[in-house]
Image (cartoon, rainbow, N blue to C red):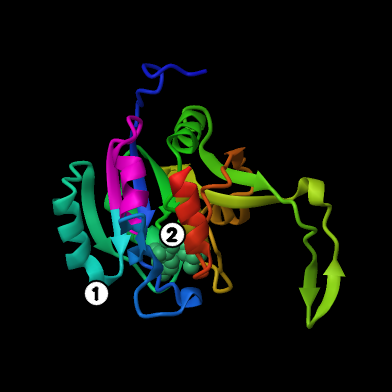
Amino acid sequence: MTSQADMQPTRKRIAVVLAAGSGRRMGGETPKQFLPLGGRTVLEHAVEAFTHHPAIDEVVIVGPAEHLTDIRRMAERNAWLKVSHIVPGGRERHESTLAALRLYEDTDVDLLFHDAARPLVSASVITRVAEALLEHEVVATALPVVDTIIESTDGRVTAYPDRSALRRMQTPQGFRRSVLRHAYALALADPSFRTTDDCGVVFRYLPGTPVHLVDGDERNMKLTYPEDIPLLERFLET
Ligand code: C5P
């Protein structure tokens, strides 16, 4: 076990909370990160997990352009001293990642990207990612799958991947800044580039760079559908 003193970084650790999505799958006008959960917003829960964590030096919030004033007010109200930047995101998730990445050009930092829609990320998960980043350049949080997962096209099963090798990716995902920047430079030159997370960009464009896995947590689920709210509320109470 790494002690708190060993956890002192040689590089600054920056948490980036990605909150610029529109949450279309939730329905409704309000993006899911601004919905209430146990008396505060989903976004407040996610941000505070990092502002309260001793291994995190700074927190960046990437939000929808039209909600930046609300987020600034939220930061003031909560006295989030570690929040260093509140910036607008892009249309796609990876454009929101890039908005944060650009803030740290030419600096030697580690970045932990987290979905604002995962409000119950625990201190232990953040610790696992931060500790792993002392040794590894790219770190992902993952859990085993319990369902049988198939591949399908046009309503027909096309593959039965071996379940024992499958994992569900969560966030935070941690990176040496320069490695993620290099991966994105290659990705952005590829006209067929698409991704749903940041580790996938390193995996695809820097195949020689290992993506190290640490354990995620069932409570660190992503708010996606309205029926997830009562489940998150129950997790919050226990
Ligand atoms: O859409 P999805 O649930 O995968 O989004 C994951 C996280 O990424 C959410 O917290 C969402 O706010 C964020 N996101 C973003 N910018 C986008 C799309 C998603 O910051 N353009």
Q: On the image, numbered disc 2 is attached to which residue?
A: 117
Percent across and percent down for residue 56 are 33, 36
User: Is residue 156 rendered to the left or right of residue 236?
Assistant: right
Whether disc 1's CB lies below 8 Å from ligand 1 is answered no
Instruction: Tell me which segment is drawn in magenta.
Output: 43-60
> How many numbered circles does the render carry?
2
Whether disc 2's CB lies below 8 Å from ligand 1 is answered yes
Q: Nearer the viewer, residue 208 or 125?
A: 125
Is 147 above or below relative to 26?
Answer: above
Q: Ligand 1 shows up in which quadrant of the image? A: bottom left
Rendered image quadrant of residue 140: top right
- Residue at image position (80%, 58%) is 148
Question: Mark 2 belongs to which amino acid?
Answer: Ala
Sequence-wise, the earlier of marks 2 and 1 is 1
Q: On the image, numbered disc 1 is attached to which residue?
A: 66
Q: Nearer the viewer, residue 94 or 37?
A: 37
User: Is residue 108 rendered to the left or right of residue 66?
Assistant: right
Secondary structure category for the residue under label 2: loop
Residue 35 included in the magenta stretch of the image: no
Rendered image quadrant of residue 70: bottom left
**Distance between the Cα atoms at labels 2 and 1?**
18 Å
Percent across and percent down for residue 147 are 76, 57
Q: Nearer the viewer, residue 104 or 106?
A: 104
Percent across and percent down for residue 80 are 20, 45
Is 37 above or below relative to 238?
Answer: below
Q: Are marks 2 and 1 in contact (CB under 8 Å)?
A: no
Question: Mark 1 belongs to which amino acid?
Answer: Glu
- Residue at image position (62%, 56%) is 204
Q: Nearer the viewer, residue 198 or 238?
A: 238
Residue 46 included in the magenta stretch of the image: yes
Percent across and percent down for residue 208 are 63, 43
Residue located farthest toward the bottom when viewing the structure as drawn: 154
